[in-house]
Amino acid sequence: IPTLPMPTNRRFDGQEVIVFSLSPPPISSPIQAFGPQWEAATGAKINLVTYPFGEVFEKLRAGLVTGGHTFDLVNYQAVWAADIAGGGFLEETPDEVQQAVQVDDYFKPYQDAAVWGGKRYGLMYDGDAQNLYYRRDLFENPEYALQFEEQYGYPLQLPATWEQYQQIGEFFSSFDWSGAGQSYGAVESMGRGVTGIYYLVGRCVSYAKTEGDPYVFFDPEGMKPRINEPGWVQGLTDWVKAAESGIGLPGAARLGFAEVRPAFIGGQAAMCLEWGDIATLSYDPEQSKIEGKLGTALAPGASRVFDRATQQWIETPAGNRAPYLAAIGWLFGVPTTAANKDAAWDLAAFMCSPVNNAVATVLPGSGIQPSRVSTVERPEFMIQAGMAPLDADSYMTALGETLAHPNVVLDLRIPGSADYFDRLDVEASRAMAGEISPQQAMDNAAAQWEEITERLGRDRQQDAYVASFEV
């Protein structure tokens, strides 16, 4: 365990900071690993309380609403901002804490993700983004390049559009290049309840999101869902085709990252759409067969985008990219009821300061992914942890392109976001199973989104949706 720098020199002798977090290793393991250093430097003690992911939101919300649990420092997902920050449960981030952690060093989307209604509530700790991961050695193989161009009429290259992604996937699933008995062209989570919904949304928004219009999920005037507009329907249509075409794992429409990651890390897939966990897994000697072979790029874009202003399709043959920050990431926040607020903020600053946060991103199993410009500009942290230099450079370069992209999409941050996504997940799975058409699935989901909005209060939801973009 490396010795980390202290962003301040304050003492909190005898104080206890009760920290609420996710069950380790994801998110809370860096607190376990580096917390003793903060305790030794400050004289305070950390009492870490963790829960499984399925319980985290309800335990946190119940504790804050009822006061039944007194937490000094909490980890919360950015998609819960409306309930946690917008609910008035958190302290604003003090100016001196913002200065200590160099808030301006965060990529702009992550700066925005810590803001609700124009005020900053907490510090970004983990940043989530989807990227395309690929086998660099396969794309650079001259024999494969010749075969691909003969078959498809254009050079083998990183896919700029979903059509190219599909064709490259078909090519690399047509022969056993891995020697494992079965090789796959492109793998991604597609199953219901196992994160597949995030990959559907990531595909749909490229068909539905035009630069300068942040409102990709709802019309902000009246909260009419946009998910049954032509762009979203096209995204689901593509997804169904990808699942049925056999470019990925058998039974892909039912599988999640528990199956996808081993297939790619184990060397059987040419491409993978995923979060940044792939990067740290790629140099795990116990799992990886792709060390030194990993490339990272922007997720593909759409060859046309539906412009809701004109209600017309716009052709975008170079690919309309709309990088999706699925789940956005985790923050540290200090509740208004905290007993030891100064100590809590000091611990948050320690965990989120530039160097310390960069070290956490390479800690095995931490689940912490880069959110800072300085981390992306310094791949040496990952290289020192064991990642091949070319792999690390490719990963950080692509991540920087994703996070700085002018058409980046923040995930949904309003009350009931999990309910909305669950309804979409259910209806999309019916389309994937061939029960209903993509259009019917999206119409059904949109109708159910309207019911959720009515139940939670249309005016309240509209105010929250607009507030989620006020930075």
Image (cartoon, rainbow, N blue to C red):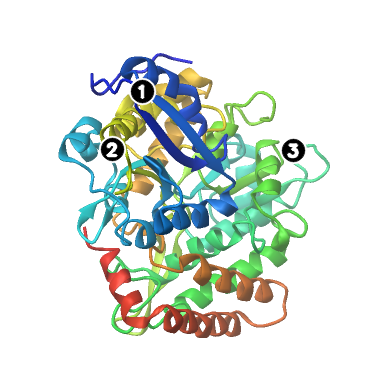
Q: Secondary structure at mark 2?
A: helix
Q: Is residue 406 above or below residue 218?
A: above
Q: Is residue 35 above or below residue 409?
A: above
Which amino acid is tagged 3?
Answer: Ser
246 relative position to 344: left or right: right
Q: Residue furthest right?
A: 181
CB under 8 Å between discs 2 and 1: no
Residue underneath mark 3: 178
Q: CA distance from mark 2 to mark 1?
A: 12 Å
Residue underneath mark 2: 341
The quadrant where residue 177 appears? top right
Which amino acid is tagged 1?
Answer: Ala
Residue underneath mark 1: 44
The quadrant where residue 423 appears? bottom right
Q: Secondary structure at mark 3?
A: loop
Pointer 2 local density, CA inside 10 Å: few below 14, some 14–19, many at least 20: some
In this orientation, does residue 264 appear?
yes
Dot placed on the residue nearer the N-terminal end, 3 or 2: 3
Pointer 1 local density, CA inside 10 Å: few below 14, some 14–19, many at least 20: some
Pointer 3 local density, CA inside 10 Å: few below 14, some 14–19, many at least 20: some
Which amino acid is tagged 2?
Answer: Lys
177 relative position to 201: left or right: right
In x, y percent, where is residue 184?
Answer: 71, 49
Q: Secondary structure at mark 1?
A: loop
Q: State the residue at coordinates (55%, 59%).
A: 199
In x, y percent, where is residue 109?
Answer: 31, 51
Q: State the residue at coordinates (44%, 66%).
A: 205
Q: Is residue 353 above or below residue 67?
A: above
